[in-house]
Amino acid sequence: MKISNNDYAFTTSGLSKSYGYIHAVNDVSINVKKGSIGLLGPNGAGKSTLIKTVLGLIRPTDGSYTILGIPEGGLHLDEIGYMPEHDCLPPDFTAVGFVSYMGKLCGLPAHVAMERTHEVLDFIGMDEARYRKIKSFSTGMKQKVKLAQALVHDPGLLFFDEPTNGLDPDGRMEMLDLIRDVSSAGKTVILSTHLLPDVEYVCDDVIIMNNGNLILYDTLDRVLGKKHVVLRLKGDRKRFVEALSSKGYQVSTDSGNILVEGEVSSNDVFESAIASNAQIRYFSHHSNSLEDIFLKMVGDDNE
Amino acid sequence: MSRFMARYSAWTGKRTSKRKRLMVFLSNGFKSTLRSKWTILALAITYGLILVPRLFMAMMPGQRFNPNFYFTLFDEMGLFIILYSAVVGSGIIANDWNDKSIVLYFTKGLSKAGYVAGKLMILVASLSLITILPLLILFSLGLISSNLTFDLLRDNIWVLAAGLSMGLYQTIFLTFLIAGLSSLLNDRRYTGVALFSSFILSRLVSDILYGLNGNDMVRLASIQDNFTMVGTYLFRLDGIYSFSRYYSFFVLLAIILIMASIVYYNVFIKELRT
């Protein structure tokens, strides 16, 4: 089946998945655009179930979905890479043997699969260890092999389910850098995690889920709100505000603070201060944190 | 830090066909089986203890194409075939479910039907090494030692056909039995034990029941006895029990169908839990 050329990574309509009385995914309708998308939610929010459902690994209880424009059942898996959350590597394979085997299963000719395997293992930074059996690997190395097998066939859409699980801080940053590199190579990345900084580091868009419900889907910029600068000064506030406003800034005052919306050039601020004969005593960039927004939204949903 | 020396690079090219990918799956599984030291050991024991002594017998004029010679070959190999089957087959599906790599196969363009077909073919190929290959070796040796006379071959080709049928039936039975148990138990050790037990316990039950009522029909409960009965039919020998040999054929067929249903349920119907 030919992949239709549309802008959506996947879409769902009234998608639900229940295990007995537990609604793992509850009536989720969403059109997820291509790009780098963070799928955020606490443990048990339904993130992994949503991914497994759109990948066709589990059957939805209700609703429908499309992935890369193809309806349920007609999935073209060559275009999809999946890095599962759980351990899923056969212990008796070597890293190079397993990744090239996965490449061949995805339709790479044998010689290409081996060449591509080495490219991908170079990319993830696995040296001689690639020739060792997977059972001897640390968690970090296993995570890298899982990443490599998802990338080996160069898919256009990649699902990463909790890729930084079990990694130390260095390993976590390395993994996020790798995913960011993949994203900047033009691939669509769906990053499922409960770690907010991971989403902020890698993604442009964010989906928030809680208790199987879709809470929010928007661009990260819009979710975080516009950046603003908070100023405090000594001198004529009114003249300073007029001077800064004349440079095209949206300026407001709030008790002792002066708030300037958007990106602010410090040169403009100090030039306005000189012009109005005022002294800048406090200058700080501010933005909402994803954590604040996440806690508020999840809190509202729980209520 | 080599990681920062390499950037992600895309790949463009023509992908291989579905058939070719299935062949990759099949050949990889078969090679993995043959590379196992336990497989080699089981093959060496079976060939060393059963086949090698028969190599000389196969060249003797009286045994060369004697149906009883080939029938007793299968009978003697019975225990070794089960041992070998447990070694090569018990992890065939169980390992994929146990280490959860099944998820990767199903997200790599391999359909569930392709997965099952591939696994069954790997089993058939592996088991044929011990059910069909020895027969072919012995028959070829007999043929060579009789100066490759065409008339002799024509007159005795049915012995080869009977042996191949017997070997194939054993292979298919064991393939489905292993696949069914492996998909049901999800653990290679349990599968191996269950495979062994199915033969030993069925024989034990059959012996106990026979001791209680003395009726030959209870022998149908024994897998081994059913194979013996099918063997006597194919090699045109006298049946050792009084019931129709078709019954044995159908009992084994029923077990094949039950096991096929178990595989179908566990792979196609049951929810994939990871």
Image (cartoon, coloured by chain):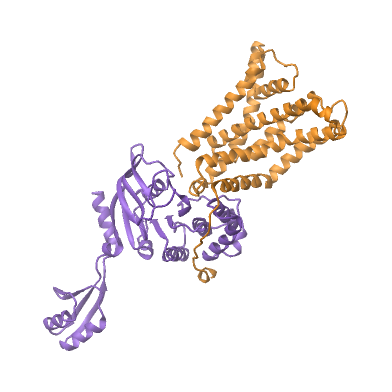
Chain colours: A purple, B orange
Q: Residue furthest front?
A: B150
For residue B2, above or below residue B98: below
Residue A35, placed above or below residue B234: below
Relative depth, front residue between A213 and A11: A11
Residue A177 rendering spot, x and y as whole percentages: 44, 66
- Do we see residue A81 in this rendering? no
Residue B92 position, x and y percent, is: 59, 41
Q: Residue at x 45, y 49 (%)?
A: A76
B103 relative position to A235: left or right: right
Which quadrant would residue A164 be assigned to in this image? Answer: bottom left
The correct choice, above or below, for A217 with respect to B246 in the image is below
Nearest to the observer: residue B242 or residue A287: B242
Percent x, y for residue A107?
A: 54, 52
| Left or right: where A54 falls relative to B141 | left
Whether residue A236 sits left or right of residue B43 in the image: it is left
Q: Tell me if I can see residue A104 in this picture.
A: yes
Percent coordinates x, y for residue A159 in the rendering: 42, 55
Number of numbered markers: 0
Give me the residue at 63% from left, 17% from top.
B247
Between A232 and A193, the one nearer to me in the picture: A193
Which sits in the foreground, A93 or B31?
B31
Picture layout, residue A76 above or below residue B246: below
